[in-house]
Amino acid sequence: MLYYLLLFGIAILPVVLLMVFIYRQDKYQKEPVKSLVKAFIGGMIAIPLDILIVTLVDALLGNTWLANTVFFSAFLEAGIPEELSKFLIFMIFIWRDKNFDEYFDGIVYATFIGLGFACVENIEYVFSYGFGTGVVRALLSVPAHFLFGVVLGYFLSLAKFEPEKRGRHLVCGLLLAMLAHGLFDWLLMVSNGLGPVIGGIIYVVFLWGDIKLWKLGLKYINKQQENSRQQAQEAALNDLEKQIHSGLKFDSEYKRIDWNAGDR
């Protein structure tokens, strides 16, 4: 019993830590718990959606030469259907949510969806393959789902608040998340399938790519934090102008924002 509790703990710990991390990065307007829970459960719901898409892909291409390639496993059975599933869940459950009202929210909700997906997947892998697998996935796979969510959420926010370029941002976000996920899996699979020398070199490339993905993710987080700051300040100024022109006093939605929060 203790062993299974340990497995469950190592499976969900990285998910919880990353959720806490991104929640704390939301400096100006924290998202309501009910919306975060909806996003997280949405990520879990993305699992059967992903299975359906993979089933269709296998039915169409499973008997072709492509099915025997690493590309097929990494991109067509993992990266593309998984990110498409998360994207669809976001558009169905989050896009019209009234709480999706600032730039940083796209990253928050997309990462919660990704971590909901990763939580179910991680529990399955850890209970199937043991504690060692849990440690490796805590360091690589779960953070990867988080980072794919950052990439997707960054562009979904741009699409939400820059409607003149909406189509471009939606396509760019989805394709980049698919590409990042597919390459992540492809490099890892190829490095495991070759000899120690070539496989080791490819694994070093994989680790380099993982570091670059972290840098990109943190860059996107910082960028949307700044966009949210500017968005909130503009809203506060608009509220002030309305008060001046109307001669009425009312509480601004952004009145009590700590403008220095992003610097701490």
Image (spheres, grey):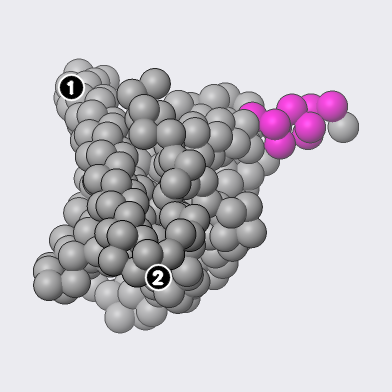
Q: Is residue 5 magenta?
A: yes
Please, what is the dominant secondary structure of the magenta stretch? helix
Q: Residue at x 54, y 64 (%)?
A: 42
How many neighbours does mark 1 have within 10 angstroms: few (below 14), some (14-19), or many (20 or more)?
Answer: few
| Rendered location of residue 251, percent (x, y) | 49, 56
Q: Residue at x 37, y 65 (%)?
A: 247
Label 1 amino acid? Ile
Q: Between residues 155 and 66, which one lies in front from this camera angle?
A: 155
Q: CB of mark 1 within 8 Å of CB of mark 2?
A: no
In this rendering, the answer to whether 64 lies above or below 132 is below
Question: Is tag 1's residue or tag 2's residue first in the polypeptide sequence?
Answer: 2
In this rendering, the answer to whether 66 lies above or below 182 is below
Q: Which residues are magenta?
A: 2-10
| Quadrant hosting residue 161 | bottom left
Tell me the residue that label 2 is attached to. Answer: 95
Q: Secondary structure at mark 1?
A: helix
